[in-house]
């Protein structure tokens, strides 16, 4: 089981350059970065875990810019988003960003997609909350048309694109794509149809959910060994990671603190025993 990391990188934390070098030096598998374009201060959406929204949510670096820096100073480190708020992007522009980063990094990019929790943020992007998931899946399908080897048109519910020359292509045809979200039949059906696996927050309920996902996956004609399950934002213990491995988890993404260089490097040294 591979061990990767995630962190809210901000203008107040360790830099992407320093963190990426330190991760690769210690043998970690990857770095995943979250996304928030902005956090409206007049919020009505509650923070999911209760209390005030942590400071770092409104200060996150753009994940694609930060990951490009990380790619430039590493050779093996995986690079991913956890997650890209796919409904909040123009899909044609996003497809270009992703393909460029994956091409320049030699196929090291993982696209983690999700649909958000902050209604005010989504509204400022013109996203209708009740249709954000359908919009997101539609945008992923459009991006896949642009990544196709030959010019391929796409006509979706929310957007379309003409058959187009669109280069560079992702290094391996399309980046590894994981979808976040709570377990459920609709999510699992979409995962089986359009992605390479599931990116659940933490690991609660995996013993019950994984068999259901595997059934949906195999019903869609996907080979069982291809399914990737990647618990995200994990607070590690030896027992927890052993449990994940026994469930068939392929990669675990450990949560780093949104701290300065000293705090983050100290945590990396603590986590290095799991690598």
Image (cartoon, rainbow, N blue to C red):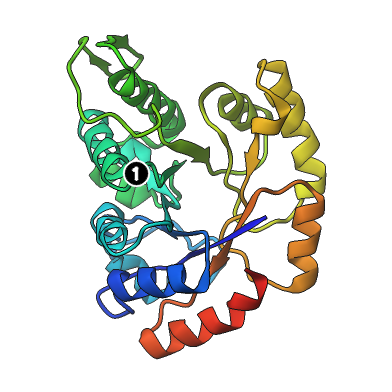
Q: Where in the figure is residue 177, as x and y percent of width and height?
A: 48, 37
Residue sitting at x 26%, y 45%: 104
Q: Where in the figure is residue 85, as x and y percent of width and height?
A: 37, 44
Tell me the quarter of the picture where residue 9 sits: bottom left
Check the image and name the residue furthest to the bottom: 262
Residue sitting at x 32%, y 45%: 122
Give above or below for 149 relative to 54: above
Give above or below for 165 relative to 127: above
Left or right of residue 95, residue 201 in this image: right
* Number of on-image labels: 1
Give above or below for 61 relative to 97: below
Give above or below for 268 relative to 224: below
Q: Where in the figure is residue 260, as x and y percent of width and height?
A: 36, 85
Pointer 1 residue: 106
Q: Does any portion of residue 126 appear in the rendered image? A: no
Q: Where in the figure is residue 173, as x and y percent of width and height?
A: 38, 26
Residue sitting at x 75%, y 56%: 244
Mark 1 falls on what kind of element? loop
Q: Residues within 10 Å of mark 1 (few under 14, many from 20)?
A: some
């Amino acid at each position: 089981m591979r061990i990767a990391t995630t962190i809210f990188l901000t203008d107040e934390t360790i830099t992407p350059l320093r963190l990426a070098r330190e991760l690769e030096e210690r043998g970690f598998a990857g770095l995943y970065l979250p996304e928030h374009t902005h956090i409206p201060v007049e919020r009505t959406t509650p923070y999911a875990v209760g209390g005030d929204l942590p400071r770092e949510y409104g200060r996150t670096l753009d994940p694609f810019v930060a990951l490009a820096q990380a790619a430039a100073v590493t050779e093996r480190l995986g690079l991913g988003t956890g997650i890209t708020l796919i409904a909040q992007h123009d899909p044609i522009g996003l497809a270009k960003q992703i393909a460029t980063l994956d091409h320049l990094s030699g196929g090291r990019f993982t696209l983690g997609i999700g649909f958000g929790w902050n209604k005010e943020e989504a509204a400022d992007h013109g996203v209708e909350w009740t249709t954000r998931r359908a919009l997101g899946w539609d945008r992923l399908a459009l991006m896949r048309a642009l990544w196709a080897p030959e010019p391929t048109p796409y006509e979706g519910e929310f957007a379309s694109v003409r058959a187009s020359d669109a280069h560079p292509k992702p290094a391996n045809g399309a980046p590894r794509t994981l979808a976040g979200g709570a377990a459920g039949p609709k999510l699992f059906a979409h995962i089986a149809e359009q992605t390479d696996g599931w990116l659940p927050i933490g690991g609660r309920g995996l013993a019950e959910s994984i068999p259901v996902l595997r059934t949906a996956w195999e019903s869609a004609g996907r080979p069982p060994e291809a399914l990737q399950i990647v618990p995200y934002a994990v607070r590690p213990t030896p027992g927890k990671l052993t449990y994940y491995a026994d469930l068939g988890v392929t990669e675990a993404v450990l949560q780093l603190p949104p701290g300065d260089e000293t705090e983050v490097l100290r945590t990396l040294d603590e986590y290095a025993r799991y690598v």
